[in-house]
Amino acid sequence: MIAPIFRQASLFPHWLPVAAARPAMSASWWQWVASTDSLTTRLTVAGGAKAFRVRLLRQTIGLPRRDEALALGIAPRRNAWLREVALCLDDTPWVVARSVAPLSQLQGKGLEGLGERSLGSWLFQQPDLVRGPLYVTRHRPRFVTEQSASLSDSVWGRRSVFQHSGLSLLVQEYFLSAMADDLGLPSR
Ligand SMILES: C=C(O[C@@H]1C=C(C(=O)O)C=C[C@H]1O)C(=O)O
């Protein structure tokens, strides 16, 4: 039984440690949200015969949101590298993601030229990669709301900070209703 406090996104804190969100989550969604290996690989496998593709929505230099700067431990009014993508199966977005990194840490990493290649595929090839704790939200991804209603129709969102060779990268991923529909996953 799901505790009543979790029924409304407005009563669910913006970001909760993943273990604290577990009572509100079905076992099937837990398998996705609490996983710490490559989401790109998981989506490719779950998609079966469907083609996996990263659709680049926006890659730019701009101000992080305040909560993003806090998560990275950087000054909120400093420009950062921002990347927003939709992870699609047969052109249907299943996940939207927004990644943020401090500009000063990007030198020599080659991320500017990543384009529609998966950031995850690159990250998980790095031998010294360390992933920080996962946090979960029921709120929708605000960064895509102006672009399309279906891109912001999320079931769960999660985020964590990756560390690799002096780079801290905040990766935020929102699992969309279209993914739940295609995979027959529950509404929560
Ligand atoms: C972190 C991963 O990378 C994925 C790919 C992303 C991209 O290309 O921008 C963004 C977030 C992820 O969903 C992963 O595969 O686990």
Image (cartoon, rainbow, N blue to C red):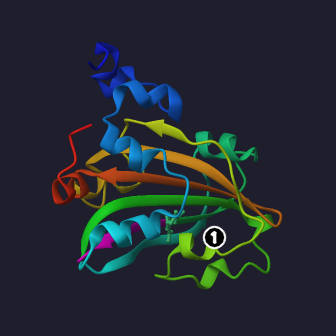
The magenta segment is: 84-90
> Is 32 above or below relative to 14?
below
Q: Position of residue 175 (x, y in %)?
A: 34, 52
Residue 84 appearing in the image: yes
Residue 122's place in the image compared with 105, above or below, is below
Is 98 positioned to the left or the right of 70 in the image? Answer: left
Residue at left 61%, top 41%?
66
161 or 57, nearer to the observer: 161
Residue 24 in percent (x, y) is at 35, 27
Query: Are there few (<14), some (14-19), or many (20+) residues within 10 Å of tag 1?
Result: some
Q: Residue at x 16, y 54 (%)?
A: 181
Q: Is residue 168 magenta?
A: no
Depth check: 66 or 52 in front? 52
Q: Position of residue 75 (x, y in %)?
A: 75, 46
Q: Is mark 1 within 8 Å of ligand 1?
A: yes
Q: Residue furthest top?
A: 4
In this view of the protein, which residue sits in the foreground, 159 or 139? 159
Q: Which residue is mark 1?
A: 123
Residue 100 is left or right of residue 77, and the answer is left
Instruction: Name the residue at 39% across, 24% down.
Output: 23
